[in-house]
Amino acid sequence: MEAPEGGGGGPAARGPERQPAPEARVHFRVVSFIMEAGVKLGMRSIPIATACTIYHKFFCDTNLDAYDPYLIAVSSIYLAGKVEEQHLRTRDIISVSNRYFNPSGEPLELDSRFWKLRDSIVQCQLLMLRALHFQVSFHHPHKYLLHYLVSLKNWLNRHSWQRTPVAVTAWALLRDSYHGGLCLRFQAQHIAVAVLYLALQVYGVEVPAEVEAEKPWWQVFGDDLTKPIIDNIVSDLIQIYTMDTEIP
């Protein structure tokens, strides 16, 4: 289910950029934890993206003060592993999380504290499933971006493509977009085009024959895509990077 693009009001429109700055900063830090823990757990990019989306979606209708955001984050990782069929052991999730918060501490023993943490994660993911009405499958932009990059590579001359890291930058922008609520406010296809658009802008790469074309290159990938939608997505991305520089 896609949210109205760039609109205000409604649960799906309340991403971190639409929330007060303190909440946005908390969500930014917590999602950074999800991404780092996901990498250490060997999660693929899609399960990590699903974990971030589950986290954001849960807090669309839930006050941040009502639950420990890091417990929600850990439970999102656990749940995303199930949804994307990359099952993770709770023991591994707890160990990686413990190392994140206590980098110089000792590994957790299989004692009463460990089993309490495990039970908390299991119970929390059940609570989250009910709160999200069991709607925890999402369409991510990754497959669209891959398709668009292949198409764009065929349009550009080989020299322009090889001398600029457009593809690497586009993938990095897409990954970083999950720090905010873009995944809930915009269609997956539109996010894929927007990060590609921004990557081209960053390196000043022009698509051949765009001036002579009947419509801009980005509209080839979606008839319902408009320049204001791209601008809104790019603006949200810039806000995410601005927040990154402000957080100590």
Image: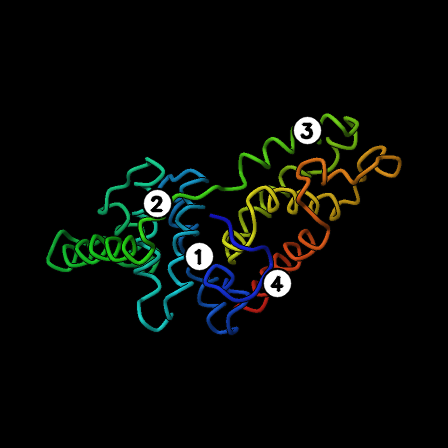
* Horizontal side, residue 115 vs residue 205: left or right: left
Tag 1: amino acid = Val
Mark closer to the chain start, 3 or 4:
3
Q: Which residue is found at the position 26% from the left and 45% from the top?
A: 92
As rendered, which of 14 and 167 lies closer to the eye? 14
Question: Circle 1 sits on which residue?
Answer: 31
**The residue tagged with tag 3: helix, strand or loop?**
helix
First-in-chain label (1 vs 3): 1
- 61 over 167 or under it: above or below: below
Q: Nearer the viewer, mark 2 or mark 1?
A: 2
Q: Which mark is residue 80?
A: 2
Local packing at callout 2 (Cα closer than 10 Å; few below 14, some 14-19, many 20+) is many
- Residue 26, above or below 218: below
Circle 4 sits on which residue? 239
Residues at marks 4 and 1 touching, judged by CB atoms closer than 8 Å: no
Q: How many marks?
A: 4
How far apart marks 1 and 3 lie (CA) works out to 31 Å
The location of residue 150, given as percent across then percent down, is 65, 28
Distance of mark 4 from mark 2, alpha carbons?
Answer: 26 Å
Mark closest to the chain's N terminus, 4 or 2: 2
* Mark 3 and mark 2: Cα distance apart in space: 30 Å
Dot 2: what SS? Answer: helix
Q: Residue furthest right?
A: 212
- Residue at the image position 36 percent from the left and 48 percent from the top: 135
The answer to whether residue 206 shows anywhere in this view is yes
Q: Are marks 2 and 1 in contact (CB under 8 Å)?
A: no
Identify the residue under disc 3. 151
How many residues crowd mark 3 within 10 Å: few (<14), some (14–19), many (20+)? few
- Indicate which label's residue lies in the foreground, 3 or 4: 3
